[in-house]
Amino acid sequence: MRALFVVIPALLLAACGSESDDQAQTASGPCAELASILDARAERTPFRSLRGAPVLQNDEPVPDAWQMSTSFDENVECTVNVMRAFMGGETDVFTLSCPLYEASGALEKERREQDARMIFDLMRSNLDACLVPDWRAKEITENPDFEIYHRLVYEPTQNENESFAFKLDPIYLELTYTPFIRERTGASGWQVKLQFQKQAPSR
């Protein structure tokens, strides 16, 4: 089991701080951390400034995958990735992905569900406090691939002037549970993930 609870105290400040703390939080707190990620998302090459060391697999660099140069917490291993010519199209997809909670298997389902939902709810409060009203959220609670599925999608209220054949979610927070092996990650059990995404024409 990989449970990343340490991320919560720092990121919860925006949701729990008093009104008198608002300016300080905007300047140096978790909202500033999210603002820096949104700034990086808007770069000509999205998230380029957040690229750290290459992700390694069998001691070899994984193409177009980097560890995040800075992170919410040392225990949260965020990664920057590029998927070029996504789905064979003319779009490159840039992502910043942060796994906030992972608990493999179906044992202790109820206790682990409480842990996963706590992290999901706290992160949701934090995102709402930092992003609204410039971003709006919508909820998706059904997915045939999962026994339990809860996805929050955040979209900017101002049009980003993008014209692609398909549209990816700009920001999403996702809680999932399945007793079966996931198709992409190969892990069963509980997961909570925060992901930022940006599309750009392929070069």
Image (cartoon, rainbow, N blue to C red):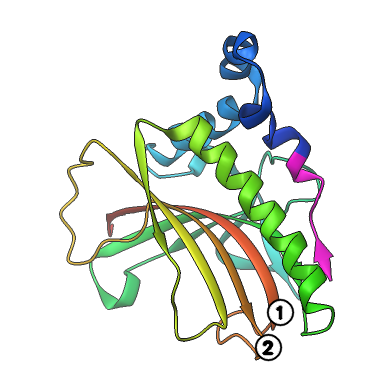
Residue 135 appears at what percent x and percent y? 36, 38
Residue 34 appears at what percent x and percent y? 54, 34
Mark 2 residue element: loop
Q: Quadrant of the C terminus?
A: bottom left
Circle 1: residue type: Gly
Asked if residue 83 is positioned above or below residue 95 in the image, the reply reads below
- Residue drawn 77% across and 36% down? 9
Magenta highlight range? 1-8
Residue 108 appears at what percent x and percent y? 84, 78
Residue 78 vs residue 59: left or right?
left
How many discs mark residues in the rendered view?
2
The quadrant in which residue 85 appears is bottom left
Mark 1 residue element: strand
Tag 2 residue = 179
- Disc marking residue 58: none
Circle 2: residue type: Pro
Asked if residue 86 is positioned above or below residue 134 in the image, the reply reads below
Tag 1 residue = 189
Depth check, front residue: 155 or 122? 122
- Residue drawn 69% across and 83% down? 188
In primary-sequence order, the first of circles 2 and 1 is 2
